[in-house]
Image (tube, helix red, strand yellow):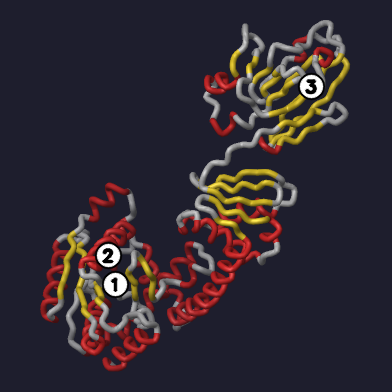
Amino acid sequence: MEIDLVAKVEKRIIDEKLVDPGDVVVVAVSGGPDSVALLHVLFALAERYSWRLVVAHVNHQFRGAESDAEAFFVGKLADDLGLSCEIGVIDVPAYIEETSLNGQAAAREKRYEFLHQIAAKYSANRIAFAHHADDQAETVMMRILRGTGPSGLVGMPERRREKKVELIRPFLRIYKTDIVNYCAQHEMTYCKDSSNELRKYFRNQIRLDVMPMLKQYNEQLPESLNRLTDLMRAEDDYLAKEAEQVFRQKTTFQQACCRIERRDFTELHVALQRRLIKLILNCLCLERDRLDFTRIESMRELILEDQVSNQVLQVDEQVYIVREYESIQFQTFAPSPKPYAYEVGLDTSELNLPEVEAKLIYSWVPASSKETTAYSSSATDVFLDLDQLILPLVVRSRRSGDRFEPYGLNGSKKVKDMFIDAKMPLSRRDVIPLLVDASGQILWIAGFRRSKHALVGPDTVRVLHMKLVLK
């Protein structure tokens, strides 16, 4: 059996080129049966392939004396094999308090940081981990329960490049029972981590409760989940290559933005549309774990919407999608609003204002004998004496030097200063609509306040009513 296990791992290493002859390999050894067996198997093969093994262990200081005993055990094991050993003592509980990360995430971050430091120290080409086939099945089950897409069903990769070092998992197709049997046949001692029995950790709940329960319906559940990862890995790889080809052919990429024509996007299959969005955002350095399904769909729907001509969607605090008619641009900087101006045609009753996602509804009627207070304006409504207006009227964005004479105040003020005094967000100042007559007089800042001009009074004959309505 032990020969079969070593031979099986050796074949996988050679077939997948996980380790090359002459490589320096840092082996992450926790002291448990999986990592002890991995070290033993690699040590058995090391002379044949001229590998230099370096043992690395992290004492996370979670379990006091138990953690210290594990560190001592790993140091002695390395010494018995004549291997270099590096023990990292990291106060993970303090790091958790400092960063507010959960325990497992914090431990993983500091552990990988330490392993990369050791790899750099010894000029190592590889870092080997003891994750096995049951770990893989549990990972896939965790992702299914939390919600995942095809890429999540791929599970842990057998090899992955990070910081110029290859992270490898030679045991990823070996099941736990084979590992434990291997340790028993070689009379190998190892440590037992008491935290593996604590159900406060999600992975432990999966291993101790969910998997045994589901095995009632399928005794080969781990094997089935691992077959699923094999299938999804091939399909995920195919779709990734297709998305990369579309990216190269259809997008124009610069340092801070990526542009694609809407027509090219809508012709793609929905699976490639989602992949392309993810690929673009990854190129713009948006972290992969923040690309949830809902966020991707909101972006996709914006691009596909037929009725939209111009719109901006803030994806993240640093990523925006700008749609301008048939051009879609992903960018890492806030778009500068473009100046706009629309003439108000009094032969119609509505004016679309895409820049503020609103419309202006208006009508003119003969003045009634009612008190003029019936025509009092508000932030979103304005009543004007039509005969005092110099036509045509224009709705436009603000311009440098604009001045406004507010109703109820003496004199005029710069529009810019009024916005600053009102603490209006900078993003709104350049898009808020100004109603201006043909002389350039500002009559109303829509959604803000009206001017003292063209007030409805006792002598008013015709009243123009305008209302700003958000879409």
Dot 1 or dot 3, earlier in sequence: 1
Q: Quadrant of the N terminus?
A: bottom left
Q: Are marks 1 and 2 in contact (CB under 8 Å)?
A: yes
Q: Residue 75 occupies which quadrant of the picture?
A: bottom left
Q: Earlier in the sequence, mark 3 or mark 2?
A: 2
1 vs 3, front mark: 1
Q: Is residue 241 left or right of residue 213?
A: right
Residue marked by disc 2? 116
Neighbours of disc 3 within 10 Å: few (<14), some (14-19), many (20+): some
Residue at (67% x, 22% y) in the render: 445
**On residue 261, which mark appears?**
none
Kindly identify which numbered label has been placed on residue 127: 1
Secondary structure beneath dot 3 equals strand
Question: Mark on residue 465?
Answer: 3
Q: Residues within 10 Å of mark 1 (few under 14, many from 20)?
A: many
Residue type pointed to by label 2: His
